[in-house]
Amino acid sequence: MTRLVLVRHAKSDWGDPRLDDHDRPLNDRGRRDAPRMARRLAETGFRPDAILSSTALRARTTAEAFAAELGVPVALDPGLYGAPARALLAAAAATGLPAVMVVAHDPGMTALAEELSDGAIGHMPTCAVATFTWDEDDWDVASAIEPSSWTFDSPRS
C-alpha cells in the first residue's frame, strides 16, 4: 500500500508588507488550526514514514505541528516552495517510503488534490488535509494510476 497526505499550510499572516512571502508566519487562526488538524489526522491512526515541507515559514510551522502530534521529523525541501502538482507528487515518490506527508502551497496542492480525486476536491483551503491511498506498493505504479481511496478534511468541516 502507498499513501500520500497533502497538507496545505495553515492560514498565514499578511500583517507586515515588508516581509518576503517566504518569511510570512502563521496568524492566530493558523496557529490554532495546525495542531487541531494534526490531532484529527492522528485520531485516524495514520502515521507517515516522512513529512516533507516547503522551507517557507508558514509551511514549516504547519509541518512542525503535525510532526509534534505524529512523532515524525520534518524534512525541509526548498523545491516544494511554489511547486506544481507533479513536482509535489514526485517529491513524495522520490522518498521511496510507503507513507509520505507533503506540506506545501497552492496552487500546486489544489491542482494535485483535484487531479487525484478526479475533480471531487476542487479547492484545498488553508490547513486542509487530503489523504490518498493506492493498493500498489510501488510509487511509480501508484503515481500513474488513480488512488483506490481518498479522504478530505479541513478546519471548517
Image (tube, grey):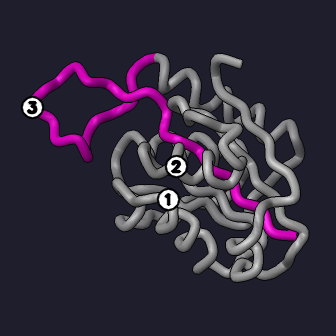
Q: In this view, does 26 lie to the left or right of 140?
A: left
**Please, what is the three-letter code of the amino acid marked with disc 1?**
Ala
Say which element carries label 3. loop
Q: Residue at the location (64% across, 57% down)? A: 101
Name the residue furthest front. 119
Whether pointer 1 and pointer 2 mark residues with C-beta atoms closer than 8 Å, the reply is: yes
Given residues 96 and 26, the one toward you in this image is 96
| Residue drawn at point x = 62 percent, y = 48 percent | 113
> Quick check: marks 3 and 2 in contact, CB under 8 Å?
no
Secondary structure mostly seen in the magenta stretch: loop
Distance from Cα at disc 3 to Cα at disc 1: 29 Å
Local packing at callout 3 (Cα closer than 10 Å; few below 14, some 14-19, many 20+) is few
Residue marked by disc 3: 18
Classify mark 2: residues with Cα within 10 Å, few (<14), some (14-19) or many (20+).
Answer: some
In front: label 3 or label 1? 1
* SS for callout 2: helix
**How many C-alpha atoms fall within 10 Å of the one at disc 1: few (<14), some, or many (≥20)?**
many
Q: In this view, does 135 lie above or below 132?
A: below
* Foreground label between 3 and 2: 2
Would you say residue 65 sits in the magenta stretch?
A: no
Where is residue 20 drawn, in percent x and y? 16, 42
Q: Which residue lies furthest to the left in this view?
A: 18
* Secondary element type, mark 1: helix
Q: Residue 111 carries which label?
A: 2
**First to last magenta residue range:** 1-28
Please tell me the numbered disc located at residue 145. Answer: none
Residue 58 spot, x, y in % from top left: 39, 40
Q: Name the N-terminal-most of marks 1 and 2.
A: 1
